[in-house]
């Protein structure tokens, strides 16, 4: 992997970050800060919580449409545009990397970009002038598989690539609409565990990986993630980076604490170190 930066971000509630919602102001400010820290990427690979497939799939269209995969919002939410191009050559590199690591994967020339891609990228890169490719999660939702998926992506050779895991470190829909003190305690405890796991420099990678593989054993973890699809993009990011993050951010979104983690490209491990 040449010069890739890897980011796990919490992308908020549907289109709300783009509609001026006050509970997303900290998230929007943080994404802007992260974007300003980096050299503009040549292409972006996004692993979104909003696409599950078996086998995993990769968008390969040169000009994907947008998928407004949310409901019940004002009409402005369906007028959002993000006309970035696709990058079929990058999609081919992704497929080759996965196949070389024994992972079944297919291209999908028809699927558009879901809001896990266009919402955060419209904040970070509003010009929509960077080509993008989207990679699905596996519908198995198996944590160890997604760690392996990230490791396989280390084989990609693409200069100035940005890899984005677009999820949400806290994702309990019922809690967003009916907050409780007990849920806030679960939230705080799980976020603290995530930060310790991803940021502790002297933790061995074997221990870090095992922690993430067995995340559901952490007290309160299932309260924070009744279904794990919004956490698994983080597993792909860590699998790719293979080390503690360089920078982390804690923001409040919809009344709950949420995290973002960044690994800068100069320290990404080479594929030759892939176990």
Image: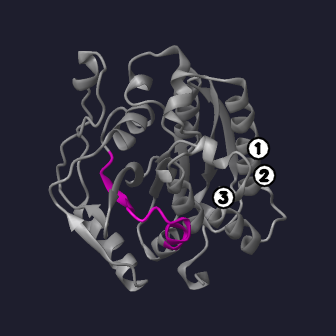
Q: Position of residue 57 (x, y in %)?
A: 29, 65
Spatial CA span between label 2 and label 1: 6 Å
Residue located beneath label 3 in the image: 215
**Label for residue 275?**
none
Q: Image check: 259 left or right of 67?
A: right
Residue located beneath label 1 in the image: 192
Residues at marks 2 and 1 touching, judged by CB atoms closer than 8 Å: yes
Q: Is residue 134 magenta?
A: yes
Q: Image check: 81 left or right of 176?
A: left
- Residue at the spot x=61%, y=50% of the render? 262
**Above-or-below relation of 72 to 163:** above
Q: Position of residue 86 (x, y in %)?
A: 24, 53
Q: Say what secondary structure mark 3 lies in.
A: helix
Q: Is residue 6 visible?
A: yes
- Point out the stretch of residues depicted in magenta: 130-148
Q: Looking at the figure, which quarter contains the C terminus? A: bottom right
Q: Position of residue 247 (x, y in %)?
A: 69, 47
Residue located beneath label 2 in the image: 196
Spatial CA span between label 2 and label 3: 13 Å
Q: Say what secondary structure mark 1 lies in.
A: helix
Foreground of the two, 83 or 170:
170
Q: Position of residue 105 (x, y in %)?
A: 31, 73
């Amino acid at each position: 992997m040449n010069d890739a930066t890897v980011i796990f971000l919490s992308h908020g509630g549907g289109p709300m970050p783009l509609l001026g919602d006050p509970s997303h102001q900290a998230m929007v400010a943080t994404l802007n800060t992260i974007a300003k820290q980096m050299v503009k990427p040549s292409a972006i690979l996004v692993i979104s919580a909003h696409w599950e497939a078996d086998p995993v799939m990769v968008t390969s269209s040169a000009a994907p449409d947008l998928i407004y995969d949310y409901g019940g919002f004002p009409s402005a939410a369906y007028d959002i545009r993000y006309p970035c191009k696709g990058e079929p050559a990058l999609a081919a590199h992704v497929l080759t990397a996965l196949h070389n690591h024994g992972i079944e994967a297919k291209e999908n020339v028809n699927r558009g970009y879901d809001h896990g891609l266009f919402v955060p990228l419209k904040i970070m890169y509003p010009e929509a002038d960077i080509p993008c490719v989207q990679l699905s999660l596996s519908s198995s939702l198996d944590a160890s598989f997604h760690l392996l998926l990230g490791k396989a992506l280390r084989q990609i050779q693409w200069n100035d690539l940005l890899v984005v895991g677009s999820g949400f470190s806290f994702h309990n829909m019922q809690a967003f609409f009916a907050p409780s003190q007990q849920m806030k305690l679960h939230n705080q405890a799980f976020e603290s565990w995530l930060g310790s796991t991803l940021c502790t420099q002297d933790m061995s990678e074997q221990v870090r990986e095992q922690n993430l593989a067995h995340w559901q054993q952490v007290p309160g973890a299932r309260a924070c993630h009744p279904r794990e699809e919004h956490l698994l993009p983080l597993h792909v990011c860590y699998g790719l980076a293979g080390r503690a993050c360089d920078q982390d951010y804690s923001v409040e979104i919809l009344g709950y604490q949420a995290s973002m983690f960044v690994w800068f490209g100069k320290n990404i491990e080479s594929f030759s170190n892939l176990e």
